[in-house]
Image (cartoon, coloured by chain):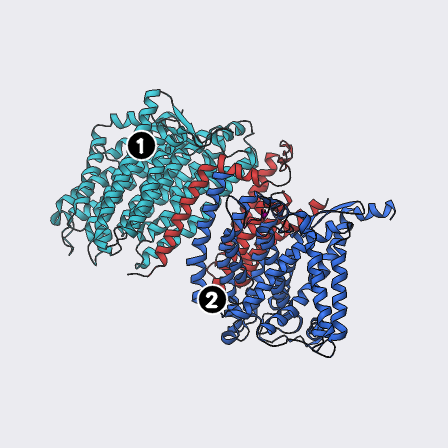
Chain colours: A blue, B cyan, C red
Amino acid sequence: MNVDLISILGNFYVLTLIKLGLVAGVLLTALAYLQWIERKVIAHIQLRVGPTRVGPHGLLQPLADTIKLLTKEDLMPSHVNKFFYVLAPMVAVFFALSAIAVIPFGPKINVFGIETYMQLSDLNIGILFLLALSGMGVYGIALAGWSSNNKYSLIGGLRSSAQMISYELPMALAIASPLLLAGSLSLREIAESQAGFMLGFIPRWSIFQMPAPQLMAFVLFMIAGFAETNRIPFDLPEAENELVAGFHTEYSSMKFASFFMAEYANMVTICCLATLLFLGGWYPIVPSPVADYIPTLVHLAGGGMLIFHGLQPARKWDKYTMPVFGVAFLAVGLLFLVPFLQPILLPLFWFISKVGILLFLFIWVRATLPRFRYDQLMHFAWAFMFPVSVVHLFVTAFLVALLK
Amino acid sequence: MNQFYTPTDHFSLLPALLLALFGCAILMLDFFVLPHPRQKRWLIFFALLGEFFAGLALYRQYRFLEDQSIPALRAFSDGLIIDGFSIFFNAIFVAAAVLVAIISYRYLEVEGEHHGEFYGLILLAQCGMYFLASGTELVTIFIGIELMAVTFYILVGFLRSDRRSNEAAMKYLLLGAFSSGFLAYGFSLLYAITGSTRLPKIAAELAQRPATDPLLLLAIVTTLVGLLFKVGAAPFHMWAPDAYEGAPTPVTAYLSVASKAASVAVLVRLFLGTLAPHRINWEPMLAVAVVLSLTIGNFSALSQTNLKRLLAFSSISHAGYILLGLIAGNRTGLTGICIYLFVYTFMNTGAFLVLISLRQKGMTGDDIDDLNGLIHRSPGHALLMALFLLSLGGIPPTAGFIAKYYIFLSLVETGHYALAITAALFVAVSIYYYFRIVRAMFLNEAGQLLPALPGWGARVGFAVTALATLAIGLYPEPIIRFAGTSLLR
Amino acid sequence: MLDTIFFYVFALLTIGGAIATITRRSAMHSALSLIVSLLGVAGLYLLQKAEFLFAVQIVLYIGGIMVLFLFVIMLVNLDQAAKERQFNRQWLLGLVASVLVGAQMVWMLNSAGVLSLPAAVPAPAATGPGNIEALADLLFREYLLPFEVASLLLLVAIVGSVMMAKKTS
C-alpha cells in the first residue's frame, strides 16, 4: 500500500463511497436472505421444511425470487392515479433504505492507517432522523392505498397511517427514556454510553443500566416496532382475510417487491435501533478477555455440529453441503483470533448477533401470535401503550434527575 | 447560571397562574366532582373564587408598586412587566370576567348548553389577556393572543345545536387564523430587524433605524393589520357582526369588552412604547382605520334590525373612538383610552345583559321589535337599557360622556382638529340609532314577549353595571386618578 | 457554493410547493404540495445548521399533521367539491388590488432607496456541532414563560375540539 493510495482512500468522499457500497451491498443481500430465513424458521416452527428446491437447503431461493419478480409483467391497472401509484413504492423503499445511513455498526476502527467510524454518517440528531424517516415512510403506504383507487387498498392505507401515527407516539416516548440516560441524540454516542460493566459483570446496557433500567422501555419499543413495521400481530393494513392484500393489492412485479423490501428494511432498522438504544450496541455481554473468545467458540461449535450432521446425512446432498458449511464456519471462527481483524470483527459480531436475535423474535412472533382486531389495536395503543410510556418516561426522568 | 424562575417572576405571574389553575381546576371539577347538570352552578362560585384570588394578587401587585414607589416591575428577563397600565387593564378583565360569569348561568340554561367548560374557558381566556396586558416580549404576546383567540373561537361556537353559532365560530376561526398569520409575520419581521423579541431591546434598536426603512414599514403594516383585526376596527371588522350575532350573548359581551381591551393594550404598548419613534409611519394608517371604523360602524348600525348586530357595529365604531386616543398619543389620550375601556366594559356588558334577561325559551329577543313597549312590560329593564344606550352614545350625565370627553380633549390638545370634528359628527349619527332602540322601548306598541324574569346573577349584574355607568358619569375623579397612575411613561 | 445551490433548491421547493398548494384543485394534490413545501422548509433549517428543527419539522409536520390531513382527505370524497364553482368570483378585483399593492410597494422601496440602506448583517451561525443544547437553554430559560403558556393554549385547543366533537347528550 503506498501513501498516495491511502490518502486517496482517506478522502472523505471516496471513503464514504466505499462504505456506502459495502453497507448497501450487505444490507440488500441481508434483506433478501431475511426472507429465506423467515420462511425457514416459520416452516420449522410449523413442522415443515420450508424452501429446499433451489440450491442446497433452498439457499438460492432469494435469487430465484428476485429473478421471478423482476421478470414478471408490471401491471398498471387502468383505474389508478398513475403518478402516485408509481411514486408510492419508491417513497416506501427510499425512506426505508435511507435509515441504514445513520446506524453505527461498531466503534472507530483503523484500517491501513485510515481512521473511520463503522457508520455511514454520524448525525448528531441520528435518532430524530430515524423517527423522521419512519414518519415519511407512512406516505409510501398511504399513497399506495389511495392511488390504487380500490376500496381494500384504501382501507389498508388508512389503517396503516392511523396505526403508524398512533404507535409512533409510544415509540418516541420509549426512545426518549434511554436518551435521558445517554444524554445525547447521536446513535454512536448513545451506544458508547453503554460501554463497560457494573460490579464487573453486569453490562451497562440501557436495559440494565442504573439508576433507571430500561427493560420496560425496551418492551414498549419492541411492541411499537412491530406495529410500525406492520408485522403480525399488527399487520392490519394487509390483513388478507379482510382486505385481500391491503394497500398493495393492485401492485405487481418490482413495485410489489419494493413494498416487501421496505418492510424488511424497516424491520432491520427497528432491530438495529433496539440494539443501539437498549442492548449496548456492539459491546459484548461479558467482560473483555472472555468476550473475545466467545465468537470463536460459537463458530467452532456451529462448524462442528454441521460437520457432525454431514457425517450422518439425513438427505442426499447433506454429505457434501454440510461439511462445506462446517469448514466455512470453522474458518470464520478462526478469523476472530487474528489480532489484526479483531477490532473490526468483534464489534460486528456482537452487533449482528444482537440484531439477529431480535429479528428472530420478529419471525418467531409472526409464527406464534394471531392478529389483533382493529379496535383492539387502537385501544391498545392509546389506552395502554401511551399512558404506560408516559409514566415510564416520567419515572426515568425523575430517577435520572435524582440519582445521576 | 442565573436562576430562571425567581420570586419576582412568580410574583409578577401570580394572577395568570391563579387564573390558569382555577381554569384547569374547573375543567377537572366539571368532569370528576360535579358531573350532574344541576351541580354546574357551583362552578360559577368556583370561577368567582378564582377571580377573587386573581384580583387579590393584582391588588398585591398594585400595593407593591405603591409601597416601593417604583413605576414598574420587570420579570422573566424583560418578558413580563407589572406597571400601572397592566394592573389597570387586568382590573378591566377581572371586572368583565366576573360580570360574564354571573350573567351566563341563566342564558346557558335557557339554551340547554350549560357545560362546566364555559367557566373554565372564561378564566383561561382571561389568562391569555393577562399576557397581552403585561407581556413585553413578542412570543409571549403572540401566544397570549392565540390563547385568548382560540378560547373565543370555542366560546363563540358554544351553542353547538345552533347553526348561527356554528357559522359564527367558523367565520371567526378562519378570519382569526388569517389575522394571526399577519401578526406573526409582523412580529417575525420585528425580530428580524432588531434581533430580539423583547420590547425594550426592540425599542432601543428601532430608535436607530431610519423611518424610511421598508422592512420596518412592512413590519408595522402587518402588525397593525393583525391587531386591528383583534380590536375589531375597520377595515378588518368583517368577522365582528357575524361573530357577535351568532355567539351566545354573554360571550358576545365578553368578546366585545375584554378581548377588545386586551388587544388595545397590546396596541398601546407596541405603538406608544416601542414604535413611538416611528409615529410618522403608523399614524396615517391608524387614522384611516379610525375614520373607516367610525364610518362603517355608525352607518351600518343605522340599518340594523338585530340588536346584537347593531351593538356589533356600534362596537366597531367604539373601537374607532378608542383608537383616536392612540393617535393623540399624549397623556390625556392614554387616560382617555383607559377610561373609555373601563367605562365601555360596564355600559356595553349592561346593554347585553338586558338582552340576556329578555331571552326566553323559544324566543331570541334579539330584534329591535322584540323590545317594543318594553316600558310597559318591565319598566326596570327599559330604564336600564336606556341608561346604557345613553352612555354608549355619550350623553352627559353618564360615564360614556367622560370617556368621549377625554378622547376629544386629547385630540384637541395634540391639534388633530379634523379628526376631532369627524368623530364628533359621528357621535350625532350614533345617537340616532341608539335612540331608535329607546323609541321602540318607550313609544311603540307592546309586543308579545313575556316580562323578563331576572335571576340573582342578572340582578347583581344590573346593579354593578348601572351603578358604575351612573357613578362614573356623576363623579369621575377616582377613576381618572386611577387611570392617571396607569400611564406608561 | 454548494450551500447556495442547496439554498435555491430548497427555496424553490418551498415556494413552488406553496404555490401548488393554493392553485391545485384536487385537495390531495394540494396536501402533497404542502408536504413538498414543508420539506423545503426543513431543508432550509438544515442549511442553517438547525438539525433539531429540521428533524422536528419532519417528524411533526410531515410525519404527523400532514398524515392526518391526508387521512381526512382520503376519507371525505372531495372530488365533487373540486369540480364545483369556487367561492371566489372576485378574481379581477383581487388581481387589480394586488397589482396596486405591488406597485405601491415597488414605488415605496424605490423611493426609500433600498440600496442605500445599511448592509444586512448575517446572523451568527450556530456554534459548534449540534444546537440542541442551545435550543433547550433558550426554550427553558429565556422563553420559559411562552413555552409554558403554549401548553395552556394546547389544552384549550384540545378541550375545544373534544367539546365540539362530542355527541350532544
The answer to whether residue A204 shows anywhere in this view is yes
Residue B256 x %, y %: 32, 43
Residue ID for mark 2: C75
Classify residue B449 as left or right of residue A294: left
Classify residue C34 as left or right of residue A57: left
Tell me the number on the disc at residue B57.
Answer: 1
Tell me the number on the disc at residue B339.
Answer: none
Q: Is residue C160 above or below residue A139?
A: above
Q: Quadrant of the image for the C terminus of chain B?
A: top left
Question: Which one is in front, C61 or B342?
Answer: C61
Q: Is residue B389 above or below residue C22?
A: above
Q: Which residues are magenta?
A: A201-207
Residue B39 x %, y %: 22, 51
From the image, give the main secondary structure of the stretch colored magenta.
loop
Residue C67 x %, y %: 52, 59
Q: Is residue B88 above or below residue B360?
A: above
**Disc 1 and disc 2: Cα gap in Å?**
50 Å
| Residue type of the residue flagged with mark 1 | Ala
